[in-house]
Amino acid sequence: MTISETRPVTDNHTVESWQRREPPLPAVAVLGIGAVATALAEATGHRLAAGVSLRAVADQEYLVILGEETELPWVDGARYLGWDGSALTLTTHQVLPAADLWRDAALAAEGADPESLVIVLPEQVLISTTAICPANPALLTGVFPGQAPPTAAS
């Protein structure tokens, strides 16, 4: 598995809360889970066929695509993420305490590499256990075989 899910244990003094963020963070990544990941893989394939350069990390349930905000694929149900310190989190909401504290707690709880990509979400914290690599159609169809490979004309 390339992405592991964790929920750090908190002590009695730590309360997690989310509040609306204004202005939103710039989107640098998009996350798809389950069927949304399959749709995101297909949309990413179309962006790659159009010559866009994107990076990815994926497993059978999760797909994270990283790139410039204007080059990211847009898919209904996907979650758009921005950097909040050293963690990715929702562009429109801010977690308290800080995302970096959740990141550090999750990495410590899992004994994960400190260089791992960490995504802090309201319901879970995701840790990538493999490196982010350039997105390519072979990666996408290998992990999400249900999606059709794009053509340059798509």
Image (tube, rainbow, N blue to C red):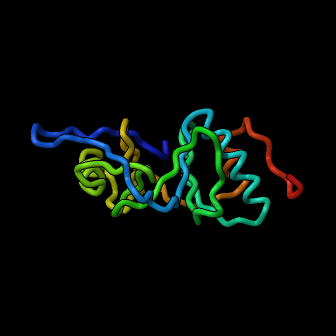
Residue 33 x, y percent position in the rendering: 54, 38
Q: Residue at x 53, y 47 (%)?
A: 31
Q: Residue at x 37, y 57 (%)?
A: 87
Q: Nearer the viewer, residue 26 or 34?
A: 26
Q: Residue at x 78, y 62 (%)?
A: 50
Q: Viewed as shown, does residue 152 lie left or right of 107?
A: right
Q: Nearer the viewer, residue 55 or 78?
A: 78
Residue 15 x, y percent position in the rendering: 19, 40
**Residue at the far front in the pictured view:** 22
The image quarter in which residue 47 lies: bottom right
Above or below: residue 97 compared with residue 50? above
Q: Residue at x 52, y 59 (%)?
A: 27
Q: Nearer the viewer, residue 3 or 99?
A: 99
Q: Viewed as shown, does residue 18 lie left or right of 134?
A: left
Residue 2 x, y percent position in the rendering: 49, 46
**Residue at the far right in the pictured view:** 153
The image quarter in which residue 32 lies: top right
